[in-house]
Amino acid sequence: MRNRDRAGFPRPSERPRRLSGLRVFASVRDRRKGFLVAGGAAFPCALGRSGIGTLKREGDGRTPRAELPLRRVFYRADRIGRPLSLQPLRIIGPRDAWCDDMADRRYNRLIDRPPGEAEERLTRDDPLYDVIVELGWNDAPIVRGRGSAIFWHLARPGFTPTAGCVAVERHVFAKVLPRLARRCVMRIL
């Protein structure tokens, strides 16, 4: 009990360090699957259907090889509880979508759309977007056609490929999100 405060919690100097970075790399066996490394732990993940690449274009299915800052966490409050995170949090609403239309001035931004209209809907019937971390890709500045909506989200069973995102199992978010520093980055190698 010497190393704990009166309430039984570890003293601040003994609490786990915040993670300032995550690493993602492709498997040598299947470029559409890989590993997300958080501190000393590695978790399987799904990658884009075209694997990791340096040249990224809208719709190409590549996960960009880059250092991507974590922007904010979106979550479905009707399906999961509020995630523990230092990242900004936002509840996903029924009108939330991500603009992937290169002709639209709102390209690669969160937009308000009535249900049913085309775009990257954030409210889905499946659980893939129950929790999403927006990654800072092509957003400073935005270049039309260079790719939009690179997210870190939940994986499908069997880790089937994404459209260019990084996807993990639900328990990974519960373990990793609370440990991330406010200015954390994801390095996709």
Image (tube, grey):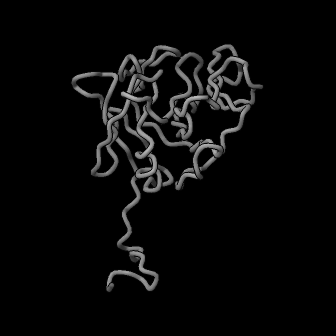
Q: Residue furthest right?
A: 114
Choose top left, top right, bottom left or bottom right for residue 62.
top left
Residue at figure coordinates x 26%, y 28% from the top left: 27
Left or right of residue 100, residue 170 in this image: left
Choose top left, top right, bottom left or bottom right for residue 170.
top left
Residue at figure coordinates x 36%, y 23% from the top left: 52
Image coordinates of residue 96 in percent, x first then y, are: 69, 32
Choose top left, top right, bottom left or bottom right for residue 50.
top left
Left or right of residue 21, residue 136 in this image: right
Tell me if residue 146 comes above or below residue 167 in the rendering. above
Q: Residue furthest left?
A: 28
Q: Which quadrant would the N terminus be assigned to in this image?
A: bottom left
Q: Could you say which is closer to the camera, residue 88 or residue 30? A: 30
Image coordinates of residue 32 in percent, x first then y, are: 34, 22
Residue at figure coordinates x 65%, y 23% from the top left: 99
Image coordinates of residue 173 in percent, x first then y, are: 45, 46
Tell me if residue 30 comes above or below residue 81 in the rendering. above
Tell me if residue 89 comes above or below residue 24 in the rendering. below
Image coordinates of residue 17 in percent, x first then y, are: 37, 62
Figure label count: 0
Residue at figure coordinates x 53%, y 56% from the top left: 84
Q: Which quadrant would the C terminus be assigned to in this image?
A: top left
